Image (cartoon, rainbow, N blue to C red):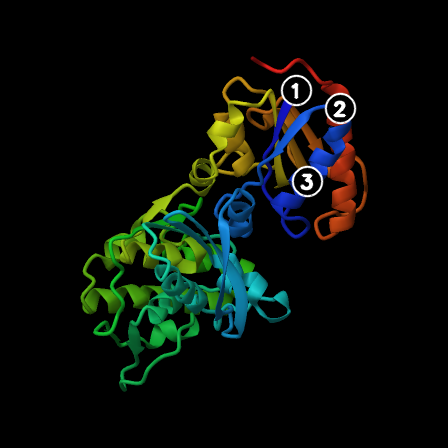
Amino acid sequence: MRVLIAPDKFKGSLPAAEVARCLALGLSGSGAECHELPLADGGDGSVEAAVAAGFDAVWITVAGATGTPRRTRIALRGDTVVIEVANTCGLATAPLGRGYPLDASSLGLGQALRQAMRLHPRRILLAMGGSASTDAGMGLLTALGYRFLDDCGRLLPPSGRALLDIATIDCAAAVRLPAVELVAACDVTNPLTGPHGAAVVYGPQKGADPTAVRHLDRGLRRMVEALSDNGFPQASTLAEIPGAGSAGGLGFAAMLLGAQLVSGADYFLDLLDFDHHRMAADLIVTGEGSLDEQTGHGKLPAAVARRAASTPVIAVAGRVPVPRNTLPGFTEVHALSDYTDQNTAHNPTLTAELLVHIGQTIARTHPAQPLQS
């Protein structure tokens, strides 16, 4: 029996490659032929999943969420580059791992984009999940040479705090992206501003209190106004497009640069050749940290099940807080919480042990069968 092990990360605990390795270790006793395909959906771990699938890792230095220089990686295969918000300037790059909702910036993503251009790619994928900032891409654009000035002509350092002070935008020295396909992978549909916008919906997750949320939302509106007044008449329209509010407004800035917004889960399944691997499998094992009411709305395990065709799919998660028969497309669902009362969300050792055990359980209930011809 050929088993395709294709999970997402277990956030806070194990990356996708380790999840796949542990499940394969448990399944190995069944005589199954296991193929590990760590996946991502455009969030943190996207570069790592690409490298595990055969992309080359390219080391770069960028500014983290609050400006501290850090070494990180982008992924390159052929003429395609994968850049990740999370590992350049995401929440995980902030000091002490806590949020800085007004002062975090997307500058590091722009620096990564500039360094990626030196590789002469035809396509650049921006994985948008895990952001720390709510700056409408002010940092990204600053790294590309856009200058944001206050009403006294002073240069503004990029951050959510500075958005309200933007008076003019000088684009004279801005880098013009060459003929490159820019793709932004995200699975949220929020506009940039308003009650469903980036600040109101996601600001609290990044540490913003109600006062900071109001400041950020007003700043996002000011960003749109300033762009509209400085040579970007399409800014107001772009701000309303579903997904403009992704990654603290980076979806909006990416579209200003000509990016196409796409579903992260499906795009990564294509990028990592999931369908090719799926056709050779008799059984697929997928999963992520939590299978819940959001699973059917663009999450990677549901995308795997949808594209599995007639191949049975088993899902594994850290926790499953919803009735399992409400989860779409899975023949079985296993949870780490079935085997422990401890919280495994930040316990990689226990997570690994239980994933091996679940792999062994799957092996016992799905004994090796003759390979398909």
- Mark 1 or mark 2, which has the lower sequence index? 1
Q: Amino acid at mark 2?
A: Ser
The residue under the point 65% across, 39% down is 20
Left or right, 259 with respect to 201, comes to left
Disc 3 target residue? 21
Instruction: Give SS at disc 3.
Output: helix
Crowdedness near tag 2: few (<14), some (14–19) or many (≥20) residues, C-alpha within 10 Å: some
Disc 2 target residue? 30
Mark 3 and mark 1 residues within 8 Å of each other at the beta carbon: no
The answer to whether 137 is drawn above or below residue 265 in the figure is: below
Q: Which mark is residue 1?
A: 1
Q: Amino acid at mark 3?
A: Arg
Crowdedness near tag 1: few (<14), some (14–19) or many (≥20) residues, C-alpha within 10 Å: some
Residue 256 seen from this side: yes
**Between 347 and 221, which is closer to the camera in this rendering?**
347
Q: Amino acid at mark 1?
A: Met
Please provide percent x and percent y for residue 87: 53, 59
Whole-number angstrom distance, CA of label 3 to CA of label 1 = 18 Å
Please provide percent x and percent y for residue 240: 30, 51
Quadrant in the picture for the C terminus? top right
Please provide percent x and percent y for residue 337: 75, 38
Left or right, 115 with respect to 55, comes to left
